[in-house]
Image: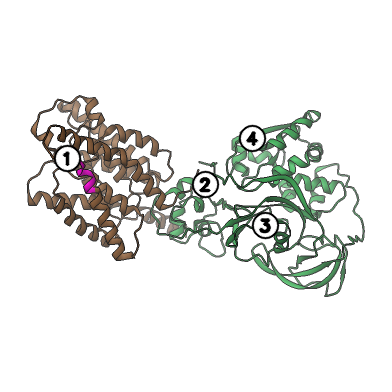
Chain colours: A brown, B green
Amino acid sequence: MKKKNIKALVIQNLILLIPFILYGVFKNGYLIYERGLINFASIFKPLYLIIISIFIKCIIDLILYRKIKFDYNLLSLVLVAMIMPYNINLLVYTITLLFTYLISLFLNKKFKLNTVCFIYLITVLVNSLMYSFTYQNILESTFNYNFSYFDLLMGRNIGGIASTSIFFCLIIYIYLTNNIYYKKNIPLAINITYLFLALIFFLITKNNNYLLNSELLFGSIFISTLPLSSPYRRLSQIFYGIFIGLVAFIVAVCFNSTISIYIATMVASLFVNIPLYEIINNKKLKNLS
Amino acid sequence: MHVVKIKENPNVFITNNIYNYLDPEKIYIPIMQEALYKKNDYLYKDTKFLLYNTSISGYITGEKKVYYNKLLVPALEITNDFKENIKSKRRKKNITNKDELIQVLEEYNLIEVAQKIKDLNQIKNLIISSIDDEIYDAKEFIILANYDEEILETIEFLQKVLEVNKATIVTKNTNAKSIKNVKSIIGTYPNIKINLVSDNYLIGYPRFLCEYLNIKEEDTLLISTSLIYDIYQILKGKSILNNIITISGDNVEKSLIINTKLGVSLKELIAKFINIIDKDYEIYLNGYLKGIKIKKIEDIIITREINTIVINKKSKEVEEDCINCGACQRICPLNINVKYCYFHNLNSPKCISCGLCNYICPANLKLKETVKSDQNEKEKY
């Protein structure tokens, strides 16, 4: 076992995201360009979003700390870019990201909010207020597809711009389970809870729309496990995961399945701020004395 | 998770030989109460003191404050006359039973092992641990490799006195030289076995070793090879006036095992034997993980409690804010909520000061120093 510092952990996570970004460029760039629906420069839209995120992070760091920090905020902003809908307007994205990131920096001094979910939800809200957009890319909204489960597994689902590959999610999760810094119980609890509920729902209603949710898998592996806004004890991780799985399923059925994991994680991260362990422990100490 | 594989620096290589430093110019004897001796008094070798006997003969030339058990205490400075004068020679010990053994061990200040034997009603397993848990430490392994016959002879003697049928030498499977040496002569000792364990950190910790060997800790006497070698010396009528220590780390040209007199100044020892590569360095006493980082070496003397000196290049890592990753708790072999203890300034009596929390922390927080049990200073958790 080798020690890693925060910078190494962030870099490791960024490297693990590269396959998703490449697949995002393929699915939301090359495939559309091939049909002549976008120009060549638009192939790299996922990269533009990521570059904007990194640029904003660097500028704010330079203003606030006089140096660029390799911290989890960098990873969070890259993740925000990757889960954005394809139709997001780059200018609106830049402005909302700048402001929401500044707000989240201020809020995180007092609360352990999940930065990714906070920025994502506000950006999506602002965008949906300004114009109507869907989570489908041009290809998905133009043609009707009849994808097999295998296609969906490889990442042809409707979702974020670079976050839809279930195959990569599974491979990377298996790799991350050997990492002592990774909270592996959280994705496990989220996905088991969600799948269990989706299966029951399928048995009752014969509706299989919720069985394969790539966004849930990606969000649970990379976003719900962001260290600052998630619990670190094993049992707390399991409860946190079950709670997210439950809320995500309810939101998916009642509102939108793409956005469900982010709403659920945001709500759960609010509960992490309640120091349950301290309360229980203080009671124990009082009883002892 | 009890045992952990720690990635060591491959450039740190410890030689198999033991170097001797038996003619120091000065030694220091800590005195915990008012001294019976004054300046210019002559002291014979092996003169009795509370903590350890004088390892040389010579005159008292002054007083100095030195560290003993993390406390700064006054010590007598004895200048060597290089004559090794002994007032009365010790005789070979003829021990026939458990009580006599306990008495002799107490006489030689081996209180801990004497107490352990006293506490055990019936010893079913005699385990001789030749495991160096700490990274950059090779003391136990080198002792077994160099004094294999003496160790086996003493084990056989202990088996007889303590009425234990079977004894097991446990060593790491990477200690090729000691395994080879012991295996070549173990055939003449039918009741002694050798058991190889994997090269993991904390495998030598008594509780975890017993778990690994699937034996009960309550009826097991676990002794290190260095202690067995001390007992051998006692049986042969010699005093324990030396200590074998490892000096290694990534900032020394050559890592060494040194057999030195007790009471020698660490500064003198390092100056004599060790070539330090980079002038910007840090020293850890008794290991990089379990030990403590010391600020200056001037006041440190070699006592029986010191096993390892690690000299590493000065770390450039700085303390950062906790990222709540929980790795400290996950790696803790006793599952202590390290982060909670750290932020509430609590300590845990369960803590064994293994240092894994400090090692793994990506924010470089000094967790061990807070969590380890120090019941006088902090609230008990």
The percent position of residue A47, horizontal first and vertical second, equals 24, 45
Q: Is residue A164 visible to the viewer in this orientation of the structure?
A: yes
Looking at the image, the residue that sits furthest to the front is: A40
Camera-near label (1 vs 3) is 1
Camera-near label (2 vs 3) is 3
Q: Main secondary structure of the magenta part?
A: helix
Q: Are marks 2 and 1 on the same chain?
A: no
Q: Is residue B305 magenta?
A: no
Looking at the picture, tell me which residue is in the foreground, B131 or B278: B278
Quick check: B149 left or right of A22?
right
Quick check: B208 left or right of A192?
right
Q: Chain of mark 2?
A: B
Q: Chain of mark 4?
A: B
Q: Residues within 10 Å of mark 4 (few under 14, many from 20)?
A: some
Q: Amino acid at mark 2?
A: Leu
Q: Are marks 4 and 3 on the same chain?
A: yes
Contact between marks 2 and 3 (CB within 8 A): the answer is no
Question: What residue is rendered at 31% in x and 45% in y?
Answer: A240
Q: Which residue is mark 2?
A: B334
Q: Which residue is mark 4?
A: B173
Q: Earlier in the sequence, mark 2 or mark 3?
A: 3
Looking at the picture, tell me which residue is in the foreground, B177 or A21: A21
Camera-near label (4 vs 3) is 3
The percent position of residue A285, horizontal first and vertical second, equals 44, 58
Q: Which SS class for mark 2?
A: loop
Q: Is residue B124 visible to the viewer in this orientation of the structure?
A: no
Contact between marks 4 and 3 (CB within 8 A): the answer is no
Contact between marks 2 and 1 (CB within 8 A): the answer is no
Q: Which residue is mark 1?
A: A40
Q: Which SS class for mark 1?
A: helix
Q: Which residue is mark 3?
A: B275
Q: Chain of mark 1?
A: A
